[in-house]
Image: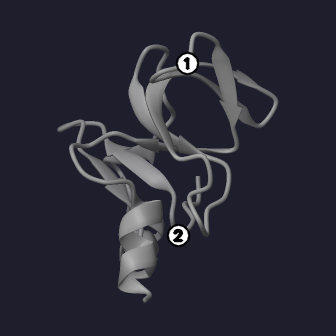
Amino acid sequence: MKFKVHDFVRNITTCEILALDLSLCHELNKDNKDFVLWVPNKGEWCWFYNDDETGENLSFGQFKSMTGSYYNAMVEMKEHIVQFFYCEPFVNRLPLVITNKRKNK
């Protein structure tokens, strides 16, 4: 499988999750034995949003399921499932949609 820049991958040995930048993406696409594409597991805490440029509707919640290409999540302060277009793993830091936006200012 070929990875793309901004994909999230999981190390199958350490379970560490990484966001791919251009150099890491090229490196893993050349020689990858230890990484798989990250996909959320039911109940996993994640960051969800609908616009990858602005972080519109940025929410923190638990992944429930997929409907087509949408992530269904139970988010904080809501009592129903909300659909989002983007999902990032929660790895004890702010989501990339925020940190990348700050870097580009």
Q: Is 76 located above or below residue 42 in the figure?
A: below
Instruction: Please provide percent x and percent y for residue 68.
Output: 82, 30
**Which sits in the foreground, 10 or 88?**
88
Instruction: Please provide percent x and percent y for residue 63.
Output: 52, 22
Q: How is the image coloured?
A: one colour
**Which sits in the foreground, 23 or 83?**
83
Kindly indicate whether the residue at mark 1 contacts the one at mark 2 (C-beta within 8 angstroms). no
Residue lying farthest front?
77
Residue lying farthest bottom?
105
Q: Is 27 located above or below residue 62 in the figure?
A: below
Q: Is 10 located above or below residue 54 in the figure?
A: above
The residues bearing labels 2 and 1 have C-alpha atoms spaced at a distance of: 32 Å
Label 2 is placed on what type of residue? Answer: Val
Q: Secondary structure at mark 1?
A: loop
Please give the name of the residue rendered at 35% of the width and 43% of the height, measured from the top-left corner. 10
**Which sits in the foreground, 17 or 35?**
17
Instruction: Please provide percent x and percent y for residue 59.
Output: 49, 39
Of the two numbered discs 2 and 1 on the same chain, state the one appearing first in sequence: 2
Kindly identify which residue carries mark 2: 5
Q: 49 left or right of 50?
A: left
Q: Residues within 10 Å of mark 2 (few under 14, many from 20)?
A: few
> Which numbered disc covers residue 89?
none
Q: Secondary structure at mark 2?
A: loop
Label 1 is placed on what type of residue? Answer: Lys
Please give the name of the residue rendered at 67% of the width and 25% of the height, measured from the top-left corner. 82
When asked about the image quadrant of residue 3, the answer is: bottom right
**Which sits in the foreground, 55 or 65?**
55
Kindly identify which residue carries mark 1: 78
Q: 2 left or right of 97?
A: right
Quarter in which the C terminus is drawn: bottom left
